[in-house]
Structures are given as structure tokens and as C-alpha cells.
Image (cartoon, rainbow, N blue to C red):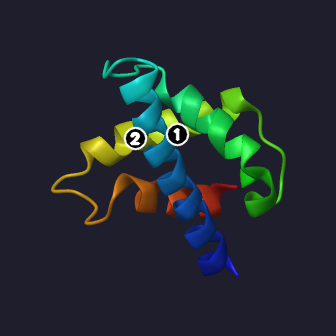
Amino acid sequence: MEADRTEAIQALLSEAEEAHGAYEATELNGVYDEQWPHWYATYAIEHGIGQMVGRELSSAQLAQLLAVSYTEYQQQDPGPGESWGQYTAHRLAAEL
């Protein structure tokens, strides 16, 4: 079911967000990670996003999708009414 897949992707993106926050705090000493899409993509691939979407993805492909989704999410006016993770999970489930 697409709803189950979307929820699984959203949960994985939430895990990535939490882990990345810890990474920024500890490894980067609180400095904003401008390469976050690559970090998220690597994390998501290592934690099974390929199985969730039913195909293999490269880190570069997924990083690009995440970056585009973030840009589009920020440009929504007045906003999509959902978190970036929810928005992106819906996009990934539909597009992949």
C-alpha cells in the first residue's frame, strides 16, 4: 500500500533528521551542515529506503531528490500544511 510506504519513508526521514541533528551538534560543533542532503541520503540508503521504494538508489540520486524537495517545500505559499518529512515522503512514495 502506498500509505504504508509513505509512513515508512516518513519515519525513516524523521530518524535521519534526529540522527543528523546529533551529528551537527557533536561532529560539526553546532555548525549548519550545508551538505545535509548527502548525509540524509547516505543514512536513508543504509537504513533501507531502497526496499521501501522498491528500487535501488544511489546516494547522489537521493540527495538530489531531497534537495529539490526541500527547495519546493520552502517555496510553497502559504505552505503545504505538513512537515518537510511528510511532504518529501509523499513525493518519494509517488515518484519512486
Q: Position of residue 29 (x, y in %)?
A: 35, 18
Mark 1: amino acid: Leu
Q: Is residue 66 left or right of residue 44?
A: left
Read off the residue under disc 2.
Answer: 70
Q: Is residue 62 visible?
A: no
Label 2: which secondary element: helix
State whether residue 27 is above or below residue 45: above
Task: Check whether the beta carbons of the residues at disc 1 and disc 2 lie within 8 A of each other.
Answer: yes
On-image quarter of the C terminus: bottom right
Q: Residues within 10 Å of mark 2 (few under 14, many from 20)?
A: some
- SS label for mark 1: helix
Q: Say whether residue 82 is left or right of residue 54.
A: left
The amino acid marked with disc number 2 is: Tyr
Residue occupying image coordinates x 73% and y 42%: 45
Q: Which picture quadrant has residue 33?
A: top left
Provide residue 30's location: percent of width, then percent of height.
31, 22
Q: Is residue 35 shown above or below 80?
A: above
Residue 96's place in the image compared with 90, above or below, is above
Q: Nearer the viewer, residue 66 or 43?
A: 43
Q: Badge 1: how crowded within 10 Å, few (<14), some, or many (20+)?
A: many
* Residue 66's disc number: 1
Residue in the foreground of this view, choosing between 30 and 6: 30
Residue at left offset 64%, top offset 39%: 43
Locate residue 46: give its quadrant: top right
What percent of the width, then of the height, locates residue 78? 15, 56
Outermost front residue: 26
Residue shown at the point (36%, 28%) measured from the top left: 25
Please name the residue shown 47% across and 36% down the image: 20
